[in-house]
Amino acid sequence: MQQNENGKTVIIERSTGNDGYEGMDKAEAQIIVELIEYIPNSVLSKTIMKKTTGNVTVVSFDTGEALTEKISPFDTFIQIIEGNAEIIIDKKSNALECGQGIIIPAHSSHVVKANGRFKMTQTVIKSGYE
């Protein structure tokens, strides 16, 4: 667990199976937005695929929640799958609606904020940085 910028708990589920997949069966269609639920006053994160070259995570944010500002050494693709979000990259605010996505460049500071409840997928690509 981590703390968000409001000092509240961020719940992280990282229990992937031996093959690096959790919450999804290979070769079967899934409704991604249903893989994760909302928890009041929290951010819930569930890694559904984890490999040495990157990972895919679904995340839900309750209204008013945010993750602390951070910098990742890797490119990160965010796609909103329910609701609306504010993604701040290098102090520039981006309002994203359901269905929209944005790439957070490697080594950029960024903050993810929930002005209302929303869900997103986060894809981190680690290859190509050797």
Image (tube, rainbow, N blue to C red):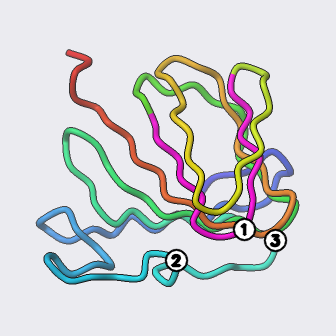
- The type of residue carrying mark 2 is Val
Gap in angstroms between the C-alphas marked 2 and 3: 19 Å
What is the secondary structure assignment of the residue under circle 3? Answer: loop
**74 w.r.t. 29: above or below:** above
> On residue 7, which mark appears?
none
Q: Reading the chain from its start, which is encountered first: label 1 or label 3?
A: 3
Rate crowding at label 1 as few (under 14), some (14 to 19) or many (20 or more) other CA atoms within 10 Å. Answer: some
Q: Which secondary structure dominates the residues rendered in magenta? A: strand
Q: Which residue is mark 3?
A: 41
82 in the magenta segment: yes
For numbered disc 2, what is the local secondary structure?
A: helix
Magenta-drawn segment = 76-89
Confirm or deny contact between disc 2 and disc 3 (CB under 8 A): no
Q: Which residue is painted at 42% across and 29% down in the image?
A: 75
Q: Nearer the viewer, residue 93 or 41?
A: 93
Name the spot of residue 112 as percent of width and height, x first: 70, 45
Amino acid type at mark 3 = Asn
Q: Which residue is mark 1?
A: 83
Choose the circle earlier in sequence order: 2 or 1: 2
In the image: residue 60, left or right of residue 19: right
Question: Residue 57 appears at what percent x and percent y?
Answer: 43, 59
Q: CA distance from mark 1 to mark 3?
A: 16 Å
User: Looking at the rendering, which quadrant does residue 109 occupy?
Assistant: top right
Q: For residue 99, which quarter of the picture? A: bottom right
Q: CA distance from mark 2 to mark 1?
A: 11 Å
Q: Residue at x 84, y 65 (%)?
A: 116
Instruction: Name the residue: 52% across, 77% down.
Output: 33
Mark 2 / mark 3, whichever is N-terminal: 2
The spot of residue 122 in percent (x, y) is: 47, 51
Q: Which residue is mark 2?
A: 33
Name which quarter of the figure residue 108 lies in: top right
